[in-house]
Image: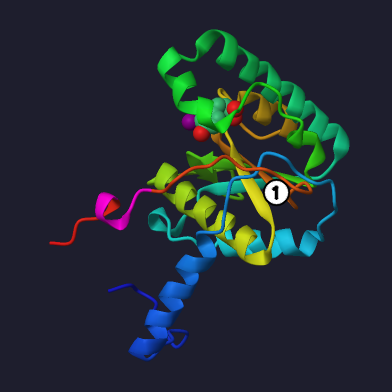
Amino acid sequence: MAQNTIPYTAYQEYPIEEMQRRAAEFYTDIRRRRSIRDFSNRPVPREIIENCLRAAGTAPNGANLQPWHFVVVSDAAIKYQIRLGAEKEEWEFYHRKAPAEWLEALAPLGTDEHKPFLETAPYLIAIFAQSYGVLANGQKVKHYYVQESVGIATGILITAIHHAGLVSLTHTPSPMGFLNDILGRPAHEHPFLLLVVGYPAENVQVPVITKKSLGEIATFL
Ligand code: IYR
């Protein structure tokens, strides 16, 4: 048993019918979420982003060491620097590095090296995964299951942003080391994702895609 415990009074049980309704309603709501690549420049109150980040920070994670750091960028000059850095890597990706098979897989999405949304959207959230933590006295603390932990936190963040009524894009220029330089993060923090957040542009279009069925993604034994 853990050394220091309190009763879990926050647990809330629902009657079966209510659970069924809640599960169905959540699915109906989250299936509306789409990755958006064309953003409005409409401002978003910072408090909304703060609460979405607080939600992300509740994620289950390795040894509760919370191996993440979120850098929220709304400053136009920094967004411009990030766009330059990302488009440089993306040019390399689309014109030099990406194998034909990968480009074929991306073709239905219509993506290319141009990333204007990195300047248009009101917020870019750079998500960093910390391979270790640093205590106030400078001592290093090893982190565990870092990728899994940060992935879960990112999933909660994306869900919170959708729940709040905003849209996002998981943007992954590769490599993303330029984010450490621009945002002044130390080398032991690895850029995980750049999450673009805001309102969708008016009359935004999204690719026609399908999701795998339950039978394809799950097995009940
Ligand atoms: N990082 C590039 C390419 C890209 C890769 C995958 I996998 C995607 O699902 C989408 C894009 C870009 O952002 O354009």
Q: What residue is drawn where x is 55% and y is 48%?
A: 68
For this orientation, the residue located farthest to the left is 221
Which element type, helix, strand or loop, lies under badge 1? Answer: strand
Is 10 in front, or is 156?
A: 156
Q: Which residues are magenta?
A: 212-216
List x then y, in percent, for residue 69.
61, 47
Judge left or right: residue 89 versus residue 184: left
Disc 1 crowd, CA 10 A, few/some/many (<14, 14-19, 20+): many
Above or below, 129 relative to 56? above
List x then y, in percent, for residue 35.
59, 45
Which image quarter has ligand 1?
Answer: top right
The residue singled out by tag 1 in the image is 197
Which image quadrant is residue 90 in?
top right
Residue 96 highlighted magenta (yes or no): no
Judge left or right: residue 31 versus residue 118: left
Which image quadrant is residue 2 in?
bottom left
Does residue 100 appear in the picture of this structure? yes
Query: Is the stretch drawn in magenta largely helix, strand or loop?
Result: helix
